Each structure stands twice: as structure tokens, then as C-alpha cells.
Amino acid sequence: MSETAWEQVANVDEFAGTDRVSVIIDDLPALIVKLEDQYFAIEDVCTHDGQPLTDGPIVENSIECPRHGARFDLKSGAALCMPATQPVQTFDVEVRDGAIFARPSNGDSSPSAPESSTVSAPPVTQLAAEGDTEQSSDATNEASGGPQEAPRVGDMLESLKKVVDPELFVNIVDLGLVYDITEDNNQVTVTMTLTSPSCPAGPQIVGQAREVIESLPGVTGAEIKLTMSPPWNPEMMTEDARDQLGIF
Ligand code: FES
């Protein structure tokens, strides 16, 4: 496999007074983020709905999408919380004599010119939303005829798009009503909200959401928890939802 070339994308001097610099890496918009003495590089596009992460707050070792609050691990790119379920691309970073080099992280962990500070990001292949961390450790169960695994959070979220708000004719995922999905021992809990506390379609939406989740292979039961905290607002919708409603 050919090695992807390092390219100089920034200089350490550019971090005077800031913890991030916008760059282009491999033709992709990216952010170089400095945390203490380490530099991380992450694609500057939220996988939930395409929002730039540029101005997102840094929370511990993650960056938060300023639009709907998804967080991504700066090193691995893993999605740490909903509404994002897919990882963001990350890049290998090297600092050489004050110049910052980067390249796509492709699993090659042997940098060509190790210098004063190196951060290597692992391949971005794994869904890592909360509640989805036991997938790989149980991978042998299915092959050995053991209990069937519950679907991944991302797949459950995709299935919930079958549930459509009967007043707005937009699915509950793109409306931003689904706040969290967790799975424990094949029991799934969906935490979601409604567009208003008095939404007359609430019982129908909740019932359909439960049906959809319980119909998935590997799921033995589903609980739908309603919350009004935080309350829903139109900013939680995806671009698809806005397009469908024609309101922005
Ligand atoms: S969480 Fe980033 S666009 Fe929705």
C-alpha cells in the first residue's frame, strides 16, 4: 500500500493566542487543535448534518459541534454522543522545526521523520457513540451461535427515520427529537422529546418508535423515555428537515 505524503499545513507560530487553526488537508477542510503540547487534526465537518466544527468548544479531549451538540474525540474522531453517530475523519500530525505536517490517517503508524511532537490517530472505522462500546468485544458470539447482538446505535437511529411526525410529515430523527439511544443486554432505551409538551401526536410517535426498535433483530425490548429537557427548538432540525418544511 502506498504511503500518503505528509504536507505542511501550518506553523506553530499561528497558535499564538488561539487553540485552533483552520487548514486544508488532502483537499478536505480541517482543524488543527492544540491541547497543552499536543496537536490534533480533525476534519472540520460534523457528521450529523455537515456543520463546521470550527467554533465548537473543546470539552476535555473532544470538540463539540456548535449546532446540535455532538462531540467528537479529537484523537480518534469517534462520535461520543448523539445526535452524531458516525466518526469524523482524523489525520496524523507531526511537528518538525516549528512546522506542522499532516496526512490522512491510514493505519500506517511509522512516521517518516519523527520529531519533537507526534500525534498519531488510529484508522477511523468504528462507530463509537455512547452505549455502543461493547460491539466488538462480543463479536465472536454470533459466530459461535451465542445471543444475537443488538444493532448499532447508528443503525437504530436510521430505523427511527421510519417514524414520521404526522403533523409535520418529517421523520423524528431529522426533526431532532431523538436525544439518546442506549442499549444494555439487548434492552434499548430511547430518550426523545416532542416538538411541544402538548403535541397531540405524542402517543402515536412514541408507540411507533417503540415498535420500530423492538422489530430490530437482537432487540428484546424497548423503552421510550420522553423528556422536555432541553426543550425542542427548530434549530435542532437537520438541513433535510428544513428543506422538507421549506422554512429556511
Ligand atoms: S450535531 Fe453537528 S450538525 Fe447536528
Image: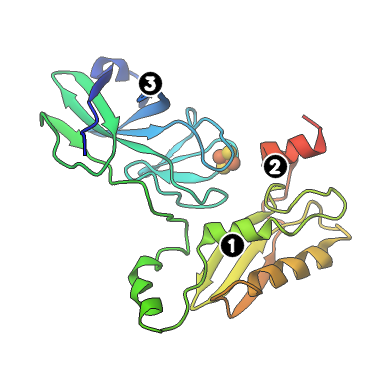
As drawn, the label of residue 37 is: none
Residue 38 % position (x, y): 24, 34
In the displayed structure, 190 sits above or below 229; it is below
| Residue at position x 70%, y 39% in the image | 240
| Residue at position x 62%, y 79% in the image | 221
Residue 201 % position (x, y): 86, 61
In the displayed structure, 199 sits above or below 146; it is above
**Which residue matches tag 1?**
156
Residue 34 % position (x, y): 30, 30
**Mark 1 secondary-structure assignment:** helix
Q: Are marks 2 and 3 in contact (CB under 8 Å)?
A: no
Apparent side of residue 47 relative to residue 117 in the rendered image (left or right): right
- Determine which quarter of the picture holds residue 113: top left
Sooner in the amino-acid sequence: mark 1 or mark 2: 1
Residue 248 % position (x, y): 77, 29
Q: Quadrant of ligand 1?
A: top right
**Mark 3 secondary-structure assignment:** strand
- Frontmost of labels 3 and 1 is 1
- Mark 1 CB lies closer than 8 A to ligand 1: no
**CA gap, disc 3 and disc 1:** 34 Å
**CA gap, disc 1 and disc 2:** 18 Å
**Mark 2 secondary-structure assignment:** loop
**CA gap, disc 2 and disc 3:** 28 Å
What's the amino acid at mark 3? Val
Sooner in the amino-acid sequence: mark 3 or mark 1: 3
**Crowd class of label 1 (few under 14; some 14 to 19; many from 20; radius 10 Å):** some
As rendered, which of 23 and 4 lies closer to the eye? 4
**Which residue matches tag 2?**
237
**Which residue matches tag 3?**
23
What's the amino acid at mark 2? Met
- Determine which quarter of the picture holds residue 67: top right
- Frontmost of labels 1 and 2 is 1
